[in-house]
Image (cartoon, helix red, strand yellow):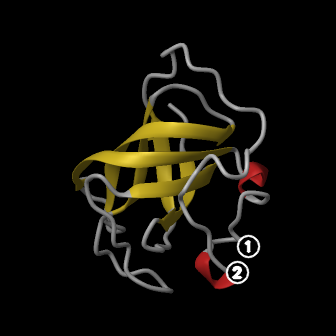
Amino acid sequence: MKTLIAALVAAVVLTGCAGEAKGPDASGLAPTDAASVGTSVAIGGDAAMSCVEAYDLRTVTNRAFAFDGTVREIGEAHTGDDLGYVDVIFEVREWFHGGEGAEVTVLMMAPGQVTLLENAGYAIDSRLLVSGEPR
């Protein structure tokens, strides 16, 4: 299983960092080679809204993976995890970089978890731009 760190931007503007991504990658969907401007509606933010660098369609391809997805399921906090990470299952609308498949699970901060910049406010049906790195 790959472990990944994800930075998030929601349709209502959200920030956070997270971990592990896993799930079926054999759905037959091929990843897109490059972000295509205008095909996704998830919004970006300024440099204060990222874990590492400015967060936009150009920089997400610098991450190991990047996708536009909709939250379908939010799991419980992992036992013994003092960071409050949960498994979040996404329906992938579009891969920008480094992945494939129609569904992926990402370990990330729980909804309402306070980050350095603001609260991680997402829920079922939230549409997010997600990117990350192996841990």
Left or right of 122? Residue 14 is right
Question: For the residue carrying disc 2, how many other residues have a C-alpha within 10 Å: few (<14), some (14-19), or many (20+)?
Answer: few
- Single out the residue that lies furthest toward the front: 38
Spot occupied by residue 43 in the image (x, y as percentages of width and height): 57, 66
Spot occupied by residue 70 in the image (x, y as percentages of width and height): 39, 47
Tell me the distance, in whole angstroms, between the alpha carbons under discs 2 and 1: 4 Å
Front residue of 80/47: it is: 47
Q: Who comes first in sequence, dot 2 or dot 1?
A: 2
Residue assigned mark 1: 54
Q: Which quarter of the picture shows residue 24?
A: top left
Residue assigned mark 2: 47
- Mark 1, secondary structure of its residue: loop
Front residue of 1/115: it is: 115
Which amino acid type is shown beneath numbered disc 1? Ala
Compared to 92, does 56 lie above or below? below
Which amino acid type is shown beneath numbered disc 2? Ala
Q: Residue at x 60, y 78 (%)?
A: 49
Q: Residue at x 58, y 27 (%)?
A: 100
- Mark 2, secondary structure of its residue: helix
Which dot marks residue 116?
Answer: none
Spot occupied by residue 48 in the image (x, y as percentages of width and height): 64, 84
Q: Which quarter of the picture shows residue 51?
A: bottom right
Front residue of 45/108: it is: 45
Question: For the residue carrying disc 1, how many other residues have a C-alpha within 10 Å: few (<14), some (14-19), or many (20+)?
Answer: some
Compared to 50, does 103 lie above or below? above
Spot occupied by residue 67 in the image (x, y as percentages of width and height): 58, 45
Q: Residue at x 77, y 60 (%)?
A: 59
Compared to 14, does 42 lie above or below? above
Callout 2–callout 1 Cβ contact below 8 Å: yes
